Amino acid sequence: MNIFLQATFEGLSLGAVYSLVAIGFVLIFRATDVLSFAQPAMVVVGAGIISYFSTQIGIPFLFAFFLGIILTGVLGLILERTFLRPMVGEPVFSVAVLTIGIDILLRVVLDNWIGINPKYMGDPFPSYGNFGSVNIAGLTVKYLEVTALITALMLIFVLSVFFKKSKYGVAMRATSLDQEAALAQGINVGRVFGLVWFIAGLLAAFAGFFITGGFNTLTNTSFISALRALPAVVIGGLDSITGAVVGSLIIGLTQAYVGYYQFDIESAYNIKLGNGFSIVAPYVIMFVILIVKPDGLFGTEEVERV
Amino acid sequence: MSKRPDLFTSYQKEISIFPNNTQKFWFVTLLLSSIYICFIASDYWIILITNALLVSIAAWGLNIVSGLAGQINLAHGVFVGIGTYTSAVLGGVATRSVIGFEMDLLIWLPLSGIVAALIGVLISPIAVRLKGLNLGLVTLAFVFIGSHFFSNLTFITGGSGLGRKSAKLNILGIDFNSGYEIGNFLIQKNQILYLISLLVTVLLGLGVKNLVRSKTGRAFAAIRDRDIAAEALGINLFKYKATALAISCFYGGVAGALLTTTFGGVEPGTFNLLYSILFIAIVIIGGAGTVLGPLFGAFFYVLFPAIIQYVVLSSNLSEQDLLITPQQIERIIFGLFIILFLIFEPRGLWGIWFRLRNYFKAWPFSY
């Protein structure tokens, strides 16, 4: 039972972090019809900027953290303005491939900076309690994971209020419904595009810190964890924020359960799933769900006219 | 008539593979000069060009499914990998850790294409159900599931980090692995591989050209342009999408089988996400949906790094002086080219070539 609770907690925390990346995906997709493969790269770039400011420049962690988040948001803004604005109205596939190009560019620069040694975030979490974790009723609870869970929930709450109440939130929803109609209503669609990428960048940097914080460290393979938000989005449906959150939780929980129970399953049924199956499991789930429901669990069904 | 190359008096003539004598002439000239290159160029260049030819076969495969039939496939590298390992198992040598049957090239080369195509057909029910971005995402899942299999089926692949030797080069029972003597003349293994690759490239290239003008090719184009309209016209979507995937995988498999034979060994980590994206980049840079595009793209992809290496080596800079390694420069330029081509020249290198050709066709008149 303890193992189950432990796995559930870790899974939820992971899922919450993935959901930040996933919401970024969904925001960009809904407002601009772009599936941004550059989002995982933004996640690691965000982490990289935070790490650079807090460990190499040496400014206090909290400042570095917020500076990193803002800068990643600005990076999203710049990317949208330079590379994606000229592509408005092009086929979705071309734009998706273009974001793959952006992803390659960002990651080369980052990988070059990371080098061989893993980078620490310089965050205070590992120093709390017993190496950053506390024992509650037999469960090992990491402070970082608790913070991730709370921060993610808060961000999701703030975002939902922003979409419902604020002027720009409403403008963003209008744009995602119909770009031309929004334009006709006097909404500055270009500014909304920029804002969407900015918010996606902010969320990516938040997620980036929680993925690489503490003892996890930033390495050349960190982006693989960030990429797992992609199956999460697909499971939930590309255009649903609720779906993104639910999908992320499913992915996070799957990954945690597989990680803890793979050995038991293997010995019970005498099958071999192979090393690192917990990394592939999200994709297998995405595969199965897409076969059953091609538009994801919460996605709106695509209606096409000939 | 010969003065008016664009005048066609029958449909048969218009869709013929070489519609006029100029094209026949250039095809034969190129073919003969590529055979000649084999005997004058150094090993370095022969290996490079062999590589480019094989990469272009794989890129043709992706072009059939993505460029012609319009189905996004982010997992082409996995099918290349399947071809590779089929060839390695059938044509490779068995060791303590991996299996191998040391068969003839004439057996493993077609079979590696066929096995890849079969696996393509096997997953096609899933791929056919989806379209657009969802299809792209499912194929992304294939990449990860494929890499998982590659790194865990150690009796086939040797396991991650270790890898295995690739297929041996036996043709009709003759062992070509350490060259072959014809009279006084020693023909190297690389040269033989080059000639085989050239032959396969020409055959499969003509195959693409032939496919484009056939009923199947026209059906692919109809599906790409508007799948629902195509279905209304009586095109069996399931059948043609599956066919496109199967042909694409066949090309990928054949290319994979020969590609790793040039390197001598293969490690499962090769077939990762970046490897699959590479082929997309090649098709985009070359020109999606065209026959010559992937060829241009592949040559660009293979020869460009060679030029960068050459410049770096000849500029008296040691690797420590540079901020980034040549491989990273390559990747930066590659990423940048994907972006720039998509924004400024969506038809890729083929588009540039097309405009150049048309400019000189009418030279000195502008139109």
Image: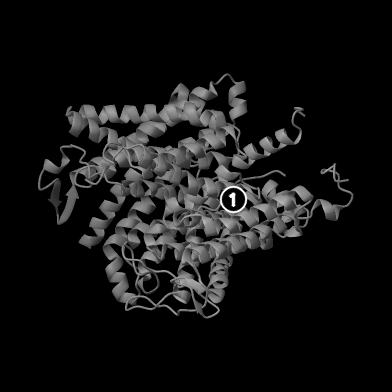
Given residues B214 and A269, the one toward you in this image is: B214
Chain under label 1?
B
Given residues B258 and B157, the one toward you in this image is: B258
Given residues B73 and A116, the one toward you in this image is: A116
The location of residue B14, given as percent across then percent down, is: 82, 51
The local secondary structure at tag 1 comes to helix
**Mark 1: which amino acid?**
Leu
In the image, residue A176 sits, relative to residue B43, either above or below, namely above
Seen at 77% across and 27% down, the residue is: B365
Seen at 35% across and 78% down, the residue is: B95
The location of residue A18, given as percent across then percent down, is: 35, 45
Whether residue B24 sits left or right of residue A19 in the image: it is right
The location of residue B314, given as percent across then percent down, is: 37, 40
Instruction: State the residue position of label 1.
Output: B295
In the picture, residue A267 is in which quadrant? bottom left
Check the picture and name the quadrant holding the C terminus of chain B.
top right
Check the picture and name the quadrant holding the N terminus of chain B.
top right
How packed mark 1 is, by other alpha carbons closer than 10 Å (few <14, some 14-19, many 20 or more), is many
In the image, residue B93 sits, relative to residue A135, either above or below, namely below
Whether residue A48 sits left or right of residue A161 in the image: it is left
The location of residue B142, given as percent across then percent down, is: 47, 59
The answer to whether residue A173 shows anywhere in this view is: no
* Outermost residue toward the top in this view: A186
Seen at 55% across and 46% down, the residue is: B297
The answer to whether residue B345 shows anywhere in this view is: yes
The image's colour scheme reads one colour
